[in-house]
């Protein structure tokens, strides 16, 4: 499998076959039937995100006026998050054999207009553990810079089936999604009433807490 290093992030284009993407899509749709998409909002201001979210795993990332955090229950239903699909656990173990088991998988759903501002992933207790991201559906323009805001960024075009791992020096890199390219994938066509066919699903798997060992 080809692997490129961009600012010390590991980029694996075409990591998932079409068949693996279809299986993963269906597993995630099944999670969404138990844990419906919610719309997070910004801490303090309460401004809504353009991206809708859900989670699977023992912990899920949420954001509202009270702040960013991980919690074991869905903010609207109060129910525990669904189990993380086995396919995701296996991918994590194969690509990150030395990392502790993932606890959270954030499911980000973009429509053609949605964007995700430049941010660092730093709400985890364990900032040494890698973050593994998988793209499904429409192609996205992803930007990644250094560990300070405002520096130069590099662009990566994330296509369906691509994997990106932030680890080591890139773990606290600023990154975001500037643009979705409609009409670039058929993976999400007529699959779910809440998922636009031109949309994109991004999964980010994380270890949140320190492992016991
Ligand atoms: C996205 N990804 O691709 C948003 N975070 O839609 C992320 O925010 C992200 O791709 C941490 C590590 C990898 C990522
Ligand atoms: Fe992120």
Image (cartoon, rainbow, N blue to C red):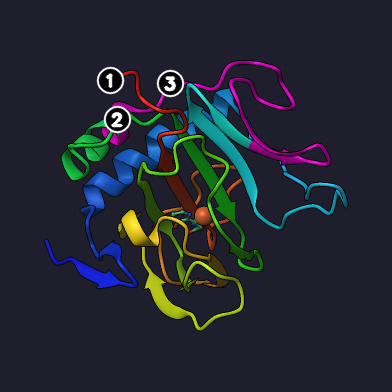
Magenta-highlighted residues? 62-88
Q: Earlier in the sequence, mark 1 or mark 2?
A: 2
Q: Which residue is mark 2?
A: 100
The vertical placement of 24 against 2, above or below, is: above
Q: Which residue is mark 3?
A: 83
Q: Quadrant of residue 78?
A: top right
Q: Is residue 146 left or right of residue 39?
A: left
In what quadrant of the picture does the C terminus appear?
top left
Q: Secondary structure at mark 3?
A: loop
Mark 1 Cα shell of 10 Å, populated few (<14), some (14-19), many (≥20):
few
Q: Quadrant of residue 95?
A: top left
Say whether mark 2 is within 8 Å of ligand 1: no
Mark 1–mark 2 Cα distance, whole angstroms, equals 9 Å
Q: Earlier in the sequence, mark 2 or mark 3?
A: 3
**Which one is closest to the eye, mark 2 or mark 3?**
2
Which label belongs to residue 213? 1
């Amino acid at each position: 499998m080809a692997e490129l290093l961009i600012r010390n992030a590991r980029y694996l284009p075409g990591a998932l076959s079409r068949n693996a993407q279809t299986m993963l899509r269906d597993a995630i749709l099944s999670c969404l039937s138990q844990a419906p998409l919610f719309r997070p909002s910004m801490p303090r201001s309460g401004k809504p995100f353009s991206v809708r979210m859900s989670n699977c795993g023992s912990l899920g990332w949420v954001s509202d006026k009270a702040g960013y955090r991980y919690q074991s229950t869905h903010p609207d239903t109060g129910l525990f998050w669904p189990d993380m699909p086995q396919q995701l656990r296996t991918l994590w173990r194969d690509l990150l054999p030395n990392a502790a088991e993932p606890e959270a998988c954030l499911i980000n759903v973009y429509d053609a207009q949605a964007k995700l501002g430049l941010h660092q992933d730093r709400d985890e207790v364990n900032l040494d553990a890698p973050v593994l991201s998988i793209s499904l559906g429409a192609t996205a323009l992803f930007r990644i810079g250094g560990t300070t805001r405002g520096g130069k960024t590099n662009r990566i075009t994330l296509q369906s089936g691509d994997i990106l791992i932030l680890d080591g020096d890139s773990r606290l890199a600023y990154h975001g999604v500037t643009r979705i390219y409609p009409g670039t994938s058929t993976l999400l066509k007529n699959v779910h009433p809440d998922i636009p066919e031109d949309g994109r699903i991004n999964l980010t798997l994380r270890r949140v807490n320190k492992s016991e060992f």
